[in-house]
Amino acid sequence: MHRRHLLRLLFVGLALPFSGPAHAVQQIISVRGWRSSDRLRLVLDLSGPVKHQTFELAAPQRVIVDLDNTRLNTNLAELPLAHSPIRSVRSGSQEANTRLVFDLNTPVQMTSFLLSPSEGKGHRLVLDFQPRTPSLLADLVVPASPASSGQRDIVVVIDAGHGGKDPGAVGLKGEQEKVVAQAIARLLVKKVNDQRGFRARQVRNGDVFVPLRKRVEVARRYNADMFISVHADAAPRRSASGASVFALSQGGATSTTARWLAERENRVDLLGSQHLLSLKGKDPVLAGVILDMSMTATISTSLDLGKNILSSLQSVAGSHQKRVEQAGFAVLKSPDIPSVLVETGFMSNTGDCKKLVDPRHQQKVANAIFEGLHQHFRTRPPQGTLLAKMKESQSV
Ligand SMILES: [Zn+2]
């Protein structure tokens, strides 16, 4: 092929099909990236609102993002792309427009949405790259221990509450719930992985925003035996203190605090992009009936699990409620995966908050949560697991 022709082809690859009146030219000021267990998220900080289009091209696989009337005013070279679905990123410009080309390692589902200024941040364009093959995701989290002779590990999916633009509850000195939750979740992951017959998976392993429904989906994808969401919330009454454990209720919440907290946790989803949420495609009546049948059994297991966790947590964190409460937390709505939400204490309580940010206390809390769930699974090991096998051999 002639060199000239090749050059022209290369140019066509980056050429931009834009035309139209020139509006104020905006800038991409910086690009930030995070990797969570299920995706790579890039955030483009913009000087103002922009119009953008995205599309995919094959051979080689790549995602193209075109930004109208926008100049790239930052370096893309330092993005954390190792072990991500993106192999490399290139940029091109024509007149005032910018094209970003993301070369891929694996097919992805790309979602993009714009965020308006909030909480000290300006206009942003968020790009989420989610691999279509879950095997790649598994490599990003905890290395899988090989399941031998059909005695699989009990899979515990651990969800650190909040994250990214959603700090959760904030203490008097600005301590953030999302940081506390992540710290305890990490310690719990280690604790679970150290125990033979158990394996932990994380919903988020970094400071990223994950919509609530997405968190439930992660548990499903890992075939979780249980899902636990770690929080440290706030209450209007500053004297409220101690730990609480919640399971899902199908009807009303068991107390006003439970209802208040559930509303608070669920409201977070409204911060997420509408583009990420989809409630379509299900027959509502049929879906409801199936869900109810499965839910009842799951809630009973969740309550037992919650009871064990609460009783071992009480000595470490004190208790806010003596029994497991039930409320309509969106994050607990897996029809077939026992799910609990643990409020490890109150960020709004001075004493609790001081303890919650202390790594030694965080370790004690993680240990107590683990003891509770370990106790539950020792008594009720799921079929086909190593623990079930061990229990069987003990009773013979
Ligand atoms: Zn929370």
Image (cartoon, helix red, strand yellow):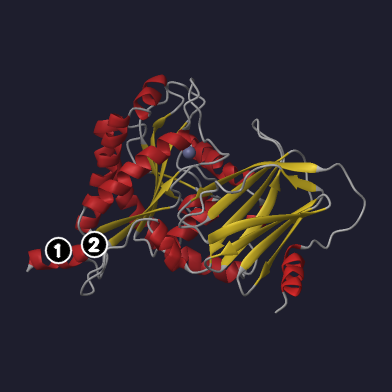
- Disc number for residue 391: 1
Q: Nearer the viewer, residue 276 or 68?
A: 68
Q: Quick one: quadrant of the N terminus?
A: bottom right
Q: Is residue 13 left or right of residue 151?
A: right
- Disc number for residue 246: none
Q: Is residue 277 visible?
A: no
Which residue is labeled 2 in the image? 381
Which image quarter: residue 396?
A: bottom left
Q: Nearer the viewer, residue 270 or 246?
A: 270
Tell which residue pokes out farthest to the right in this image: 21
Q: Nearer the viewer, residue 304 or 136?
A: 136
Residue ID at (52%, 61%): 85
Cβ atoms at labels 1 and 2 below 8 Å apart: yes
Tell which residue pokes out farthest to the front in this image: 3
Q: Residues within 10 Å of mark 2 (few under 14, many from 20)?
A: many
Secondary structure, mark 2, is: loop
